[in-house]
Amino acid sequence: MSSTKIFQVRGQPLPRFPVKNHRMINTVVCGFPIISHHRVSNVLSRTSGPFLGYVPARTDENPFLRGDSNGRFGKFGGKFVPETLMSCLRDLEDEFNFVLSDHEFQVEFTAALRDYVGRETPLYFAERLTQHYKNIARTTGDGPEIYLKREDLCHGGSHKINNALAQAMIARRLGCSRVVAATGSGQHGVATAAACAKLSLECTVFMGTTDIEKQSSNVLSMKLLGAQVKLVITI
């Protein structure tokens, strides 16, 4: 799995690279994580939100603690993958940075999140759970108000399709015709299969034998969405 950090920078879009057809990438294993900036919207954006964490003062004094534009911290960080994957990962990174400011991609992604995924999902006030903890804390006159973000209402039953859909869209832009994923509980497999079904991409999901037995309903959902589920035997 790649652990490269993608920096959201301001400026002009990166140059477009030629499309390479009939190439297969793993949008799940080879995908790049999007760094959260406490934003409500799932639309990819170059604009970073507020940083709410604590940064030690000495960070400004030691360049090894800051990191550079390539995601390296001194001798640490960067990509550590087989050399045969580097070309694919570079293409993926270039395309990712390009779509951050590509209006056509953003419009399509926003529409898909709304009409296919079912966003925005509601914020539900858990009244009885709130009252339960207020009763526990009644001696202090305090207690939390608990709200649940209903990501389980997204198409596929989890939040995972938000990420899988964007990655599948990037794979299609790169000229890929097939997506490969690995899943444990099956939720990510269902999300990837749903994304591929919308985009007319072939989908192959690898899943362990024990997980297939435990999560038979998710296996059925993946197959109904057109994905091939491959059995993986581990020792």
Image (tube, helix red, strand yellow):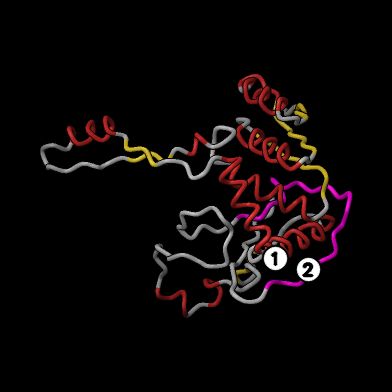
Q: Give the SS element for disc 2.
A: loop
Quarter of the picture containing the C terminus is top right
Which residue occupies the foreground of this view, 34 or 124? 124
Magenta: main secondary structure equals loop
Q: Determine crowd level at label 2: few under 14, some 14-19, many 20+ residues with C-alpha closer than 10 A.
A: few
Q: Could you tell me residue 200's position as x and y percent? A: 77, 40
Q: Residue furthest right?
A: 22
Q: Residue at position x 66%, y 23% from top? A: 210
Kindly identify which residue carries mark 2: 16
Q: Could you tell me residue 178's position as x and y percent? A: 81, 42
Q: Give the SS element for disc 1.
A: helix
Residue type at mark 2: give it.
Arg
Which mark is on residue 68? Answer: none
Q: Could you tell me residue 229's position as x and y percent? A: 75, 28
Q: Residue at position x 58%, y 46% from top? A: 113
Residues drawn in magenta: 13-33
Q: Could you tell me residue 180's position as x and y percent? A: 76, 40
Q: Is residue 200 above or below residue 102?
A: above
Residue type at mark 1: give it.
Phe
Q: Are marks 2 and 1 in contact (CB under 8 Å)?
A: yes
Which residue occupies the foreground of this view, 86 or 33? 33
Which residue occupies the foreground of this view, 79 or 186? 186
Q: Is residue 147 above or below residue 107?
A: above
Kindly identify which residue carries mark 1: 98
For residue 35, side relative to residue 209 (left or right): left
Q: Quadrant of residue 125?
A: top left
